[in-house]
Image (cartoon, rainbow, N blue to C red):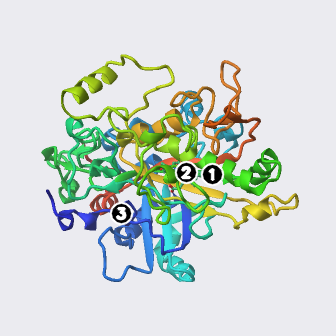
Amino acid sequence: MKKSNDFEFDDLQGLLRFGYGKLTDTCFMLLNIANVDAAKQWLNTAPISNAVTMDSPPDTALQIAFSVHGLRILGVSESIIGDFSDEFIHGMTRNENSSRRLGDIGRNAPERWEWGNDSVTMPHILLLLYAKKGDLEAWRKTVEDDRFSQAFQLLRQLPTSDIGRVEPFGFDDGISQPTIDWTYRQSTDPHERDRYSNLLAVGEMVLGYPNEYGQYTARPLINPKKDQLATGLPDAEDDPALKDFARNGTYLVLRELGQDVPGFWQFLDKASSSKSKKREHLAAAMVGRERNGTPLIAEHIPGISRKDHGNHFTYDLDAKGNHCPMSAHIRRANPRTGDLPGGVTGLGIVGFINRLIKILGFGQKPEEDLIASSRFHRLLRRGRSYGPFLAPEDAIKPDAPVAERGLQFICLVANISRQFEFVQNAWIVNGKFNGLQEEPDPLLGNREPLLSGGSTDHFNRPDPSGPMQKTCHLPQFVTVHGGGYFFMPGLRALKYISALPANGGNSSS
Ligand code: HEM
C-alpha cells in the first residue's frame, strides 16, 4: 500500500482533490487564444493551483483546461492529439447520433446552444477562478495581468452564483462523491470486489494510473528520444521508456444546464393539488433525497444517519423501488450496484451456486434488469450553480420572478465515454432503465417522443399499499445551453505546452 504523501499532488490540479467549497465566489471564463506566444508566456508562469494540502487552505485558486482546438493552436502535435480519446477529439456535438444519445435533441439540440456547438463557439481554454467571499475581483485582476490581456480574448463568461449548499431547485447538492483511493487500499480484482464500494481506483479520475479494470486508460505517450521537450514529463508507469503527457491530467466535462425553477415547482404543486406535503414527497421521489439531503432509503436501512445525509447505503434492500423509485435522479445517476446483483453474496457452496445461477442468468425475472456495475461509471462532480436563489415556496406563486437559473455542470473523468457519456445516455436519458420502460430521468429528461413514437414524459412511483402512482405530462425542467469536453493537464504537461516551439511540437508517440 502507498502512503498518500507519496502521491504526486504537486503535479495535479487541485480540482481533482478539492471541491473548493469554501471559495464561494467563482468566475468561469471561456477564452480564445489571440496571441499564441503571449499565451505560452502567460501559461508558463500562471498561478495554477496544485492539489497539495496546506495547513491553512488558500483564499484563491485557479484551474485551467484546454479544448482540442486550444491544444492544436498552442502547437501540440497531431501525433499527441490523436492519442486522446475520440470523444475529446471530436467533441460533445460530434454527430447526430451522439447528440441523440446524450439527450441533446429538441430544445436541447446543439443548434440552439449559446456556445460549444461548433469550432467558432467552442473555446480554446476554460479558466476557472475561485476566491473567498469578496476576494474575487482582486484575484481576477491578479490573474488578468498585461500578458493575459495580450494573449486571450474572452469569448464568454459563464454565469455562476453562490446560493449556498443547494442547487437551484432547492435540494442540497454535492453530497455523494466517489472517494479516490490515493493509497491503493482496495483491490480492483472482480473476485475480491463483488459489492458496491465508494472507494475508487485513482485511474478512474486521473490519467496515468490503473483504473477499476486494473489497466491504464489509453492516452498520449511520447518517445523522449524524438522529443527533447518531453524529458520534463513524468515516465509512463506502464511503459517507462516513454513519457506520459496525460499523467496527472483528467478530462473535464462541462454542460451549462438551465433550470426552470418556477416551472418545476408549479408543475409539482399542480400535480399535488397544492398540498405542500404531497408536493415535497413528489419532488423528493424525483430526486431520491429530501430537500435537506436525507436519502429516501434512510428510514429503511438500519443504522443510517439522517443527519449527516447518510451516504453509506445501497438499493439492495429496495429492489422494487418502494422507498426510492427506480427512476429517481440519484438512483439512476449511481445505482450503487456491485459487480454482481444484490442478494447473491452468500458464503460457501450455497453462495457460489447462487452467484453462478445469477451470472448465467437462470431464474431471472423480466423486471430484474441487471444494470452495469457502478464502479466503472462514476463521476467526480465539481459544478456550480448560477442565477438568483428562489425558494420553492416562492417558486409556486404565479408571479414568481423569472430569471436565468441553472447549473454549470462539471465532472472530471478519465474516460469520457465509459463514465460521463454512459451515465448520461444509459442511465439518465434512456427510457429503458432497471426494468423501467419509456421513462427517463424525471429532472433531466427532454420529454421528446421516442423514435418508436412512445412518450417519455411520465414518472412512476410504486406504492407498496396500492397501485403504481403515475405523474404524467412532465414538462422539460432542464435545458442544455452549451457544453464541451476539455483536457485538464498535470502541471508538468502544462509546462511542456507552454514551452512548445512556435511552429508546433516535434513530438511523436
Ligand atoms: C440541472 C441538472 C441537475 C440537477 C438539478 C441535479 C441535482 C442533483 C441532486 C439534488 C443530487 C443529490 C445530491 C448529491 O448527492 O450531491 C444529485 C446527485 C447526482 N447527480 Fe445530479 N443533477 C443534475 C445534473 C446531473 C447530470 C447531468 C449528471 C450526470 C450526467 C448528474 C449526476 C449525478 C450524480 C452521479 C449524483 C450522485 C448520485 C449518488 O451517488 O447517489 N447530475 N444531482
| Badge 1 or badge 2: first in the primary sequence | 1
| Badge 3 or badge 2: first in the primary sequence | 3
Q: Is residue 263 left or right of residue 18?
A: right
Look at 45% across and 77% down and name the residue there.
60
Residue at the left extreme, as displayed: 241
Look at 55% across and 63% down and name the residue there.
29
246, 149: nearer the viewer: 246
* Rendered image: mark on residue 17: 3
Kind of residue at disc 2: Leu
Kind of residue at disc 1: Ala
Residue 374, visible in the rendered structure: yes
Q: In this view, does 113 lie to the left or right of 492?
A: right
**Could you say where residue 70 lies in the image, as x and y percent from the top left?**
45, 52
47, 208: nearer the viewer: 208
- Disc 1 and disc 2 in contact, CB within 8 angstroms: yes
Q: In this view, does 321 lie to the left or right of 402?
A: left
The residue that label 1 is drawn on is 284
Look at 72% across and 42% down and name the residue there.
476
Quadrant for the C terminus in the image: top left
Kind of residue at disc 3: Arg
* Rendered image: mark on residue 296: 2
Quadrant for the N terminus in the image: bottom left
- Disc 3 to disc 2, C-alpha distance: 28 Å
- Disc 3 and disc 2 in contact, CB within 8 angstroms: no
Secondary structure state at the residue bearing disc 1: helix
26 versus 357 height, above or below? below
**Could you say where residue 275 lies in the image, as x and y percent from the top left?**
79, 53
Secondary structure state at the residue bearing disc 3: loop
- Disc 3 and disc 1 in contact, CB within 8 angstroms: no
